[in-house]
Amino acid sequence: MDPAGSVVMLTPAPTEAFPLYKIGDYITWGWNYTNLQATPTAIDLYVKCSKVPQPWTLTQNMTWATKGEYTWDTKAFQTEHVENPLLTEQYTLVIADAETGPSATPEAGYLAPFSGFHFGLYKPMDYQDSADGWTCASCSGARRATGVDVKGLGMALGMCVVTVVSFTWFVVGIGMF
């Protein structure tokens, strides 16, 4: 039995682990099709996010070509979707045959809906000068410039004192001294 048709991502390179894109930039994706015996008349592209119930439609009825390519203007998209903006999250690109849609059952030789490409989007934050009172949330205030952890040093000294006191008590208790 022949396999269902599928998509192979070319751009970004398949070796790129997890692409991360800034909201406001252009994103270009490129792909090829494999195992197609019946070519689709048109292609639909969607972007899904687990935090949003409905996927965003990027394009519908895109002309089918042997090598697919799409450039997404995330800045314009964000401006057009003010009521449902893009989030700083993980997303999935969905490529589907326009006739059968993204939830079609894969059939031999026909394009199966593709959702194997994951990427991240982030919203850039404005620059904030450290002189304006910014503090590092993940930095420890207990550290000194020398790199010595004061809490750790206190714990070690405390354990030394407990060890000496308890050993002395034990030795005195059994009458060795």
Image (cartoon, grey):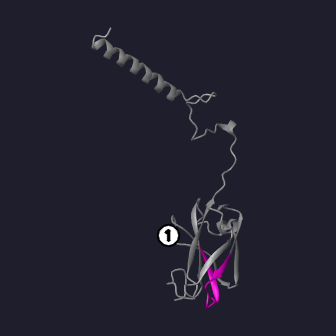
Q: Which residue lies at the image location 61% right of the left edge and 30% below the top edge?
A: 147
Work out which residue is located at the far top of the displayed protein and give it: 177
Could you tell me which quadrant the C terminus lies in? top left
Q: Residues within 10 Å of mark 1 (few under 14, many from 20)?
A: few
Residue 87 or residue 155, whichever sits in front = 155
Q: Which residue lies at the image location 63% right of the left edge and 89% below the top edge?
A: 39
Work out which residue is located at the far bottom of the displayed protein and give it: 38
Q: How many marks do you count on the picture?
A: 1
Horizontal arrangement in the rendering, residue 40 relative to residue 162 (left or right): right
Horizontal arrangement in the rendering, residue 117 relative to residue 68 (left or right): left
Residue 147 or residue 123, whichever sits in front = 147
Residue 177 or residue 110, whichever sits in front = 177
Q: Position of residue 164 (x, y in %)?
A: 40, 17
Q: Amino acid at mark 1?
A: Pro
Query: Which range of residues does the magenta coloring cover?
Result: 31-46
Q: Position of residue 134 (x, y in %)?
A: 63, 39
Q: Which residue lies at the image location 62% right of the left edge and 62% below the top edge?
A: 17
At mark 1, the secondary structure is loop
Query: Residue 84's image quarter?
Result: bottom right
> Can residue 152 be found in the magenta stretch?
no
Query: Residue 15's image quarter?
Result: bottom right
Q: Position of residue 34 (x, y in %)?
A: 63, 82
Q: Position of residue 23 (x, y in %)?
A: 66, 61
Query: Residue 118's image quarter?
Result: bottom right
Work out which residue is located at the far left of the displayed protein and give it: 174
**Which residue in the structure is indicated by mark 1?**
53
